[in-house]
Image: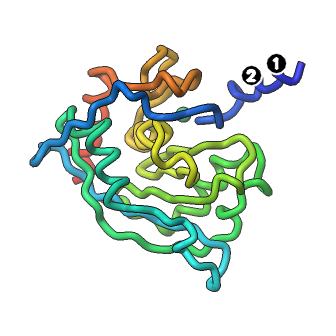
Amino acid sequence: MRYLLFIFLLFLLPSCAVEDDYVPTSIEPIFMDNPSAKLLVDIIYVVPSKNYNQSKYAMDETRFMDFINGCFFNRHNIGFEMGESRVLINSELYDLKDNRDQESSVFNTETQDSYRQDRMNIYIIPRTNTVAIAGIGLKQRALITDEFLFTTTTPHEIGHALGLSHREVEGNIMCRVKPYLRKEFDSDQVDTMYNKILSIN
Ligand SMILES: [Zn+2]
C-alpha cells in the first residue's frame, strides 16, 4: 500500500521526484572546444542566514561544469560556461520541507528577483531539506539538491529550464521513471534547447 502511495505521489509531483539516480557508466564524456550554442551559468548557493557558511556545500564548480558539458551537452554542440557563483540568503527556499507540495511555486516566487534572464541559473539547497524532491526546473532556473548534483537530475532540470517537458521514454533524460536509465536527449529536445539558448543570447 505504501508503495502504491509512493508511485501515486511520484506522478503528482510537478517534477523530478527522488528515486535512485546516477550517471550510467555507459556515458563517455565528450568535450568540444567551441560549441556554437553557449550559455553562461551562475551557481547560486541558497543559505538560511548571513551566518551560514556556504562552503558547507563543498561544491567543486569546475568538476560540475565538466560533468554537464562532457556527459550531456557538448556532444550536441551546446556548451555551458561558468558565470559567477554567489549566495542567496533565503530561508523559505533553503528549507523546502516546510513547503511540501508547493516546492515549484515557492522556487518560482523566491527566485524571481535573483535570477539573471541572460543566463542559466542553478540554485543549490541541501537534499536533507526536501521531502520528495531531487530538483526543480523552470524558466532558465534549476534547483538541484546537493546530493543530486552529479546525477542525471541536473541535465533533467536544465532541460526543463530550457523549455522541455517530460517525455516518458525509458532512457530519455526527461523521463520521470527509472532515472538510473536516463542517458540522452532526442534530436527534437536538442533543437528546442539549442534554439532557446540562441534566443537568450
Ligand atoms: Zn522533471
Q: Which image quarter is the N terminus in?
A: top right
Give the labeled residue for mark 2: 7
Give the Cα distance between marks 1 and 2. Answer: 5 Å
The image shows residue 79 at horizontal and vertical percentages of: 22, 46
Q: Nearer the viewer, residue 103 or 200?
A: 103
Indicate left or right for 96 with 181 as reference. Answer: right
Q: Nearer the viewer, residue 82 or 148?
A: 148
Instruction: State the image quarter where residue 48 is shown.
Output: bottom right
The image shows residue 122 at horizontal and vertical percentages of: 45, 56
Disc 1 to disc 2: CB gap under 8 Å: yes
Q: Which amino acid type is marked by label 2?
A: Ile
Q: Counting other residues with Cα less than 10 Å from the Cα at mark 1, is it few (<14), some (14-19), or many (20 or more)?
A: few
- In this view, the residue farthest toward the front is 25
- In this view, the residue farthest toward the right is 1
Q: How many marks?
A: 2
> Secondary structure under badge 1?
helix
Instruction: State the image quarter where residue 5 is shown.
Output: top right
The image shows residue 99 at horizontal and vertical percentages of: 76, 53
Give the labeled residue for mark 1: 4
Please tell me whether residue 167 is drawn above or below residue 53 in the rendered image.
above
**Residue plotted at (78% across, 26% down):** 6
The image shows residue 164 at horizontal and vertical percentages of: 42, 32
Instruction: State the image quarter where residue 128 is shown.
Output: bottom right
Indicate left or right for 193 with 157 as reference. Answer: left
Please tell me whether residue 78 is drawn above or below residue 173 in the rendered image.
below
**Residue plotted at (35% across, 24% down):** 26
